[in-house]
Amino acid sequence: MVLLVIIVLAIVAAVVVPRFLPKKEERLWDEVKQKDVKTVKPIFWLVWTVRGGLLAIALFCFLQTSFVIVGDREVCHLNRVYMGSNMEPGQIIAMPWQKGPQARILTAGFHFLPFIRVSHDLEMLDMLTVPEGKYGFINAADGNSMPDNQYIADKWDNDKDMINAITFMGGDDKDTWKGPKGTKGPQLTVIKPGDYRINRYLFSVTGFDATDVPIGHVAVIKSNVGKTYTGPPILPTGVENTNLSVPIVPEGHLGVWARSLTPNRYYLNKKAYDVTIIPTQVQTWKYIGGYTRRYIDLVLDADGTITQSVRSEVVPLIEGTADIAVLLRVENWDVWQDARIQVQVTPENAPFVVAAAGGLDAIEDKIITPTFRSVLRNEVAKNVPDVKEVWNKETNKMDMVDYMRPRKVLDLLYKREATESAVEDKMIPEGAKVGLTVMEVRFGDPLVPPELLLPGKRKQLAESLISTYGQERLAQEERVKMEKKRAEANQQDRLMASEIGINVADNNANAREKEGSGEEKYMKALARGQEAQANVLGKEAALELAVIEKVLAAAERNPELVKFPNTLVINGGGGMGSLEGAAAILGKNNLTMGLMKKTTPPTQ
């Protein structure tokens, strides 16, 4: 404003100041009257010098008020202060001829606009940057009023037109203004990541996270804006359920869009669309834990006595499970049954899942879980097929007859597969009603009361003991055999020596037997010879002869017994002459004395 005053003053001074400058006289000739006239005028060069200076000052001040330089990442916002009419009540963005915030903005570069700095306040603001992974949600401060049945403005066909404040407020390149095109308030159109030069007086922008659909999932869109769909119901193939909380509609209409979004990044206005991410992979819903497990342990003492003890442990509900195990009542016993259900949602059925219940979690909690519990309990309450022996009077033998009987607790343990199949067959159509494909139902081991398992455990332990004892007996027998073999191996030298000794003894016995046989023959022959000798010599002479042979043999074996006498004794005769001669030859000693005693006949 000061510069404008200076410009005015300089122009006024350029006009007025010459009157006060020094003057000089000049003679002028009146051509008509031919008269010599005198006049006074300012000095020419001085006048134009002063005027030129003042005009230069005015021009400089004018230029200072008429150009704008905008930086590369700046946006110049204009607010008219002077030389314009007032805005209408409620108006935020002024038309070009009105005072107030203008729709026009100045982008990077040099701009020459006469007196722009005088008539407007200028504000330099940074460019708008929407980072990657975000989108810009726009709220317009001015424009047409929002219709009563809407809370968000309609989508623009061209995003660039929407964020152009001049176009939004109804202007064009010809500077023709026909009234706002845009609607005041939240905008359905969003801006994607990037840098934007937008009018911050008209638009406020808030950043929100983009929608990322991971692999193995789809995004189902529930639109809260758009036209109402009036066509035939849209349902998956083979599904007749029309009791949907939200209708399935074509894209762009109000409701759940029939087309789900495949894995990618989407910039969806979360003020207008509810996005539900549905996994299309096979899901396993677990019903495990939430009870106390009891045990009866059997302990075998050293003396073979079986004792039992009771213990228990809490099986908690594991994080991520659908719910606790299913409580069943069979034969007045409480039995906890762990279970797993494998399900899958196809991309085609994902919108139906959302339209039917709001999402996969809602289907799990509100539909599948209570349905599964009911189906399982109903199936367990049914009678089960079995066979029994019945006497057939016609054939006079036992026949096997099929019959139905109430389910027993141990059936849950030993006939689990049949129960699984029956429950699975009933869960498949129940899942299809909400767009769910039930793949399989599998049970864990039921929590059978340990009292019912105790007889079987004791029997098994007893059979195991019998088998163990038998194995131990065989092991002992084998051990004895092994010890015997080991002892034999350790005594091998002695056994060999003994065996050799036995063989030697046998040989000696055979030799002695043969020697005895020969001796017997010899003695018999000798007896016959002695008998013949006795018959010839007489019995006494024969006896003496035998004694002498024995004595001579002994002397031969023991030469030291032989003595040579100094006196020769000659037998004077008699029956003992031969012995006395022998004694005289051998000498007087124990041997000869013995011979004499034995051969001397007793006194009559």
Image (cartoon, rainbow, N blue to C red):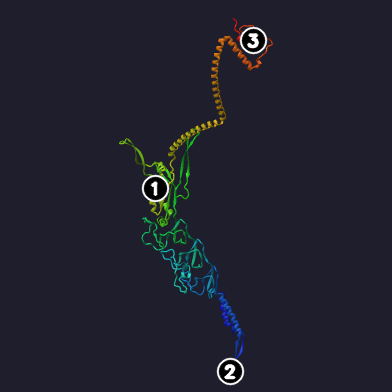
Of circles 1 and 2, the one toward us is: 1
Question: Amino acid under label 3?
Answer: Gly
- Along the viewing direction, whichever of 278 and 177 lies nearer the viewer: 278
Q: Which residue is mark 2?
A: 35
Determine whether 67 is above or below 193 in the image: below
Secondary structure of the residue carrying tag 3 is helix
Secondary structure of the residue carrying tag 2 is strand
Residue 581 badge: 3
- Along the viewing direction, whichever of 502 and 87 lies nearer the viewer: 502
Q: Which residue is mark 1?
A: 423
Q: Residues within 10 Å of mark 2 (few under 14, many from 20)?
A: few
Where residue 583 appears, as percent x and y from the top left, is: 64, 11
Determine whether 427 is above or below 49 in the image: above
Question: Amino acid under label 2?
Answer: Lys
Residue 331 appears in which quarter of the rendering? top left
- Along the viewing direction, whichever of 284 and 367 lies nearer the viewer: 284
First in residue order: circle 3 vs circle 1: 1
Q: Are marks 3 and 2 in contact (CB under 8 Å)?
A: no
- Along the viewing direction, whichever of 437 and 335 lies nearer the viewer: 437
Which residue appears farthest toward the right when viewing the image? 566
First in residue order: circle 1 vs circle 2: 2
Quadrant housing the N terminus: bottom right
C-alpha distance separating marks 3 and 2: 242 Å
Secondary structure of the residue carrying tag 1 is helix
Where residue 304 appears, as percent x and y from the top left, is: 48, 33
Where residue 450 appears, as percent x and y from the top left, is: 44, 40
Which residue appears farthest toward the left when viewing the image? 394
Where residue 282 appears, as percent x and y from the top left, is: 44, 52
Q: Residues within 10 Å of mark 1 (few under 14, many from 20)?
A: many
Of circles 3 and 1, the one toward us is: 3
